[in-house]
Amino acid sequence: MPGLVGEYECKLDAKGRFLFPSDLRKQLEPTAQENFMLNKGFEDCLTIFPMNEWEVLSQKLSKLNLFKPKNRMFYRLFHQGAKRVSLDNAGRILIPTMLMERVGLKKEVMLIAYNDRIEIWDKSRYFDLIENNMSDFADLADEVMGGEEDVE
């Protein structure tokens, strides 16, 4: 599967549900379009993994040596609040209240799809994060993507 891509604005209803964007759903493999794993992301967001991608990640995690304290702690922190979620008959996903509160989700959210996952951000927090980091984007690109300069 090519990497997921796109930003999608969504609204949460009173129960904490959002309509999963059809364009995003079309990017998923047919067997991965309805069931997902939802957990806390690395910053103030939630992360949705299609189940096929979660299974790949779980295989990698299962190889961690759990006799090492750092590995155990990472495993615990990564799985905190993890919950299986599925699309309902109307194509919505319900976000558990506990997870919504943990990352400060309000009514307007952004879905940010990249690679094998989809992040769920409170809309204002997401745009604050992007705005606060845009001035460093060129330096970040050089650090992450830049290689050794060609010598002639």
Image (cartoon, rainbow, N blue to C red):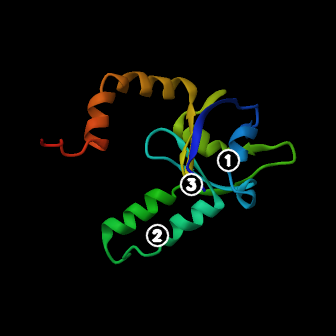
Q: Residue furthest left?
A: 152
| x, y percent for residue 132 | 37, 23
Q: Nearer the viewer, residue 100 or 51?
A: 51
Q: Nearer the viewer, mark 2 or mark 3?
A: 2
Residue 60 shows which numbered tag?
Answer: 2
| x, y percent for residue 131 | 41, 21
Pointers 2 and 3 in contact (CB under 8 A)? no
Classify mark 3: helix, strand or loop. Answer: loop
Q: Is residue 17 above or below residue 11?
A: below
Q: Amino acid at mark 1?
A: Gln
| x, y percent for residue 49 | 60, 54
Pointers 1 and 3 in contact (CB under 8 A)? no
- Residue placed under numbered mark 3 in the picture: 81
Alpha carbon distance from label 1 to label 2: 23 Å
Classify mark 1: helix, strand or loop. Answer: helix
Image quadrant containing the N terminus: bottom right
Residue 27 shows which numbered tag?
Answer: 1
